[in-house]
């Protein structure tokens, strides 16, 4: 009930905050807006001017339970972060991104929905200050989390010579807290909540700062957490048909025994990742605590499922009547569920493989229109998108098939390039994002009108523009039925 009461207070505070009337556009620190997504406009794009090393928190709250927001943040160096869930609050229809900006410039914030639910939402943009700025050593750092529900943000230096096993210990009995760890490029590595006594997360080697955000799950409570570089965690590698033990451990007492008359997968002493599909390429849905189990209904290539998630046979032991398991279809993995997990076996996001490359994550809402399918209005054979050499820019249009405007040809022109360095050339990333249930049918490419369209939604290219060669042509086409709204995002990479 305390969680519900605080959720209601949070919602009321957001709804009665200062509300701007404009849809999208420029947004600044401290602003709170209420706007809406619809079938005709299933994404809203904001622009934020930020400076290097600023820590930005973006929070989006959907007004109805069915609206599960997504947040994509792009900056001068490409995509920074993506999320469609928020373990820092006990409600499901919200999303949060906390990211440390790698450089000054114009950042794009794209708000969409991960489900068919659309409608009104509230967005708040806040700036915070990192709390820990020095290298942690053998002496633990104790964090005092006050009541009131405010998040605390800390920076943790990466180790260039190897992974860091980061341990968070709960020093207050029955204290419920939430935490989120982000990589230097803004991607969320791990989120967890509950009253776990000890949690250890493996931070991959690097040269920049990881970001830790913590808060009390119950706004009426306070407690202490101790952060230290202790514990032993094996590195995680992706791919393949086996899954390593999760890089998250927690103190667990008690535990139930699997039923003798059903096939069950029992996790080992390090626990087991439960993923959305039968491969380490799929995201972690939840974690089985050490010696915990799940009932198995089918299998596929050495992975076992309960109908919702999958575990690798390499990290579990089967018990019960498991000889006649059927083969499950893994072509369309089920989405993560919002089922609550008891605090003693709380689901903890395991650390995915971290690389320094830009990760492009689909932010396409999967809605089903309840009215007649929209059609794109036929427009000019050539559309122009002008961007400044130092700011980049965005362009949004739509295509549909078999009726309406099936193709667009967009000319991207970079203005203000000169014939003298350093302004004689620029390197840009050109990313195409999509919104609509039929986004898989949109293809795009560069070059002449008859050039092949080999790329899909949420793919990017790099283009170098000079004073005498300052334009790039994009061909957008629907190669199947449906309606898609696309957004071209041009950001500076060099």
Image: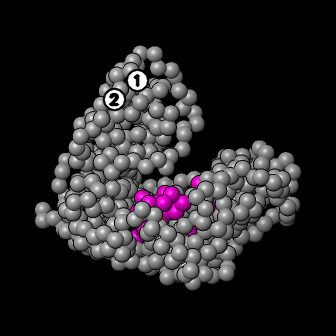
Q: Which residue is drawn at 40% across and 70% down?
A: 100
Which quadrant of the structure image shows residue 57?
bottom left
Q: Which mark is residue 258?
A: 2
Q: Closer to the camera, 29 or 69? A: 69
Q: Magenta segment range?
A: 85-114
Q: Position of residue 204 (x, y in %)?
A: 31, 53
Q: Closer to the camera, 12 or 73? A: 12
Q: Where is residue 313 in the image (x, y as percent from the top left)?
A: 36, 28
Q: Name the residue under label 1.
A: 262
Element under label 1? loop
Q: Is 404 rendered above or below residue 222?
A: above
Which quadrant of the structure image shows residue 273?
top left
Q: Residue furthest left?
A: 138
Element under label 2? loop
Q: Closer to the camera, 456 or 166? A: 166
For label 2, the crowd category at 10 Å Cα-Cα, with few meaning under 14, some 14 to 19 and many 20 or more, is some
Q: Is 73 rendered above or below residue 364?
A: below
Residue 215 as seen in the image, left or right of residue 125: left
Q: Are marks 2 and 1 in contact (CB under 8 Å)?
A: yes
> Is residue 296 in view from this perspective?
yes
Q: Which residue is drawn at 63% across and 82% down?
A: 20
């Amino acid at each position: 009930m305390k969680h519900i009461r605080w959720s209601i207070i949070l919602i009321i505070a957001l709804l009665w905050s200062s509300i701007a009337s404009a849809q999208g556009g420029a947004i600044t620190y401290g602003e709170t807006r209420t706007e809406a997504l619809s079938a005709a406009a299933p994404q809203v794009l904001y622009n934020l001017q930020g400076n290097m090393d600023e820590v930005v928190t973006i929070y989006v709250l959907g007004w109805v339970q069915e609206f599960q927001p997504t947040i994509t943040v792009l900056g001068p160096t490409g995509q920074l972060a993506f999320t469609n869930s928020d373990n820092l609050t006990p409600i499901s229809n919200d999303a949060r991104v906390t990211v440390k900006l790698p450089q000054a410039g114009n950042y794009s914030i794209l708000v969409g929905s991960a489900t068919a639910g659309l409608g009104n939402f509230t967005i708040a943009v806040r700036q915070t200050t990192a709390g820990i700025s020095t290298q942690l050593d053998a002496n633990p750092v104790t964090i005092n989390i006050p009541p009131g529900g405010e998040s605390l943000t800390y920076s943790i230096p990466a180790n260039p010579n190897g992974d860091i096993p980061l341990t968070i210990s709960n020093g207050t009995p029955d204290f419920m807290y939430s935490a989120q760890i982000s990589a230097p490029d803004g991607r969320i590595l791990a989120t967890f909540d509950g009253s776990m006594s000890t949690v250890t997360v493996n931070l991959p080697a690097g040269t920049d700062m990881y970001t830790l955000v913590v808060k009390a799950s119950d706004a009426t409570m306070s407690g202490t957490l101790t952060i230290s570089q202790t514990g032993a965690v094996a590195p995680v590698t992706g791919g393949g048909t086996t899954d390593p033990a999760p890089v998250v451990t927690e103190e667990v007492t008690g535990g139930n025994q699997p039923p003798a008359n059903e096939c069950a997968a029992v996790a080992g002493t390090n626990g087991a990742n439960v993923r959305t599909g039968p491969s380490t390429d799929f995201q972690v849905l939840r974690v089985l605590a050490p010696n915990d189990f799940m009932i198995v209904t089918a299998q596929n290539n050495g992975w076992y499922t309960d109908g919702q998630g999958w575990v690798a046979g390499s990290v579990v032991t089967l018990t019960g009547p498991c000889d006649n398991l059927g083969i499950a279809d893994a072509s369309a993995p089920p989405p993560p569920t919002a089922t609550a997990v008891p605090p003693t076996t709380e689901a903890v996001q395991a650390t995915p493989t971290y690389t320094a490359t830009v990760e492009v994550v689909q932010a396409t809402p999967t809605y089903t229109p309840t009215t007649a399918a929209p059609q794109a209005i036929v427009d000019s054979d050539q559309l122009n998108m002008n961007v400044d050499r130092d700011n980049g820019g965005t362009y949004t249009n739509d295509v549909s098939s078999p009726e309406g405007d099936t193709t667009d040809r967009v000319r991207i022109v970079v203005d203000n390039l000169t014939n003298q360095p350093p302004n004689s050339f620029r390197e840009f990333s050109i990313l195409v994002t999509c919104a609509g249930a039929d986004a898989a049918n949109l293809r795009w490419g560069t070059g002449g009108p008859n050039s092949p369209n080999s790329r899909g939604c949420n793919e990017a290219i790099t283009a170098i523009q000079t004073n005498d060669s300052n334009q790039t042509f994009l061909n957008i086409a629907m190669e199947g039925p449906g309606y898609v709204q696309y957004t071209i995002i041009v950001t500076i990479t060099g």
